[in-house]
């Protein structure tokens, strides 16, 4: 059971108190919090009594990290909760030659432009495996990915008699969705269970949110990630979100001083989940080296000077190639916000971080 579910069920109990209680029972914190001095307040006591009604077996069976657990401290509208799917069907697309883990999708959220999902990989406890992030080093502390210990990965596996298994999941770049960027976060539920949240953003809107989820696992004997065992799952998500689009044009020429770039237009797409900003610009680069050196990208600001919060990764022009027609699109995924009739684009070097200039934008 997740902290968010219990808070919703109890209702009036203070969220921080309930989270603290759940954290202790789930043992998900790196360090236990010190209990406050004095008597337990009536509200916290009510929460404790409510929790005590849950049987230990039910609590353990339903324990996992949900989307809102991963997104703690980051903005996601409450309306997005209504679009979350649970226990999403995911069918293997082919034989996987004895993939050693169970891989399932516990929660997912799609809005036609982005996908967020939590995949859970689990091993039979009798296999004596420790599931670790695919980029973890043996010298990393296991507390970095949620295990309650100060030992390193090498020390922890040696002390507990476990074999490490490096695991990961990703949305496959197979054309099913025009994925532009994706990122992931990993948290250990236990030694043998790992929850991984993927955030993947498509370069273009998609009505059909069907894609291939690739689960990977490799032991010490695998020399490179390419040697990992794989299981591919076909996943189809519902796109229940509504979207609206607003077109913007620059006030003035749109030229960015000191660069080869001219902003032509921008499009803002709103869904219940996020705000997507696409900046369409031209650039007269003499070479790929010039484009990489300029490394231009954009930030967005409201009329009062507040930067619009970026929710997921920036695509930097330094990472791409030259366009044959000199036309480019920069995509920003923002926390859901009302952009309004006007906003400001700030062009900057996404490697060196120096600012080139600003372009005022207005709705058409």
Image: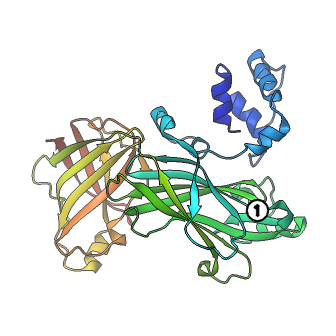
Q: Quadrant of residue 340 in the image? A: top left
Q: Secondary structure at mark 1?
A: loop
Vertical comparison of 10 with 185: above or below: above
The residue that disc 1 covers is 123
Q: Quadrant of the C terminus?
A: top left
Residue at left offset 59%, top offset 47%: 70
Q: Quadrant of the N terminus?
A: top right
Furthest-top residue in view?
Answer: 42
Task: Confirm whether residue 36 shows in the render.
Answer: yes
Residue at left offset 66%, top offset 46%: 65
**Residue 291, horizontal then vertical, whole percent:** 27, 73
Vertical comparison of 45 with 260: above or below: above
Q: Quadrant of residue 270 in the image? A: top left
Furthest-left residue in view?
Answer: 252
Vertical comparison of 143 with 302: above or below: below
Task: Confirm whether residue 139 shows in the render.
Answer: no
In the image shown, does 328 or 213 lie closer to the viewer? 213
- Marks counted in the figure total 1
How packed is label 1: few (under 14 Cα within 10 Å), some, or many (20 or more)?
Answer: some
**Residue 236, horizontal then vertical, whole percent:** 48, 54
Residue at left offset 19%, top offset 79%: 286
């Amino acid at each position: 059971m997740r902290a968010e579910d219990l808070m919703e069920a109890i209702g009036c109990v203070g969220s921080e108190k309930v989270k603290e209680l759940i954290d202790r029972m789930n043992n998900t914190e790196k360090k236990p919090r010190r209990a406050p001095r004095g008597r337990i307040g009536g509200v916290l006591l009510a929460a404790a009594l409510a929790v005590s009604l849950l049987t230990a077996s039910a609590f353990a069976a339903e324990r996992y990290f949900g989307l809102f657990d991963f997104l703690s401290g980051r903005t996601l509208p409450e309306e997005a909760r209504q679009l979350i799917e649970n226990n999403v069907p995911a069918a293997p697309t082919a034989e996987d030659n004895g993939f050693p883990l169970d891989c399932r999708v516990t929660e997912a959220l799609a809005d036609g432009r982005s996908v967020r999902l939590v995949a859970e990989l689990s091993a039979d406890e009798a296999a004596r495996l420790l599931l670790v992030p695919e980029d973890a080093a043996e010298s990393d502390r296991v507390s970095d990915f949620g295990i309650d210990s100060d030992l390193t990965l090498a020390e922890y596996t040696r002390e507990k008699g476990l074999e490490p298994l490096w695991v990961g999941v990703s949305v496959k770049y197979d054309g099913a969705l025009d994925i532009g960027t994706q990122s992931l976060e990993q948290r250990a539920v236990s030694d043998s269970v790992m929850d991984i949240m993927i955030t993947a953003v498509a370069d273009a809107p998609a009505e059909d949110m069907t894609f291939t989820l690739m689960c990977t696992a490799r032991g010490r004997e695998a020399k490179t990630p390419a040697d990992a065992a794989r299981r591919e799952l076909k996943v189809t998500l519902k796109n229940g979100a509504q979207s609206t689009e607003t077109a913007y044009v620059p006030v003035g020429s749109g030229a960015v001083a000191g660069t080869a770039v001219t902003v032509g237009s921008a499009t803002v797409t709103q869904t219940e989940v996020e705000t997507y900003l696409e900046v369409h610009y031209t650039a007269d680069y003499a070479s790929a080296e010039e484009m990489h050196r300029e490394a231009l990208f954009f930030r967005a600001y409201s009329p009062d000077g507040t930067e619009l919060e970026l929710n997921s990764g920036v695509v930097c022009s330094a990472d791409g190639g030259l366009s044959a027609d000199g036309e480019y699109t920069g995509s920003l995924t923002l926390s859901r916000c009302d952009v309004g009739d006007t906003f400001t684009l700030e062009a900057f070097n996404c490697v060196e971080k120096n600012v080139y200039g600003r372009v005022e934008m207005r709705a058409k």
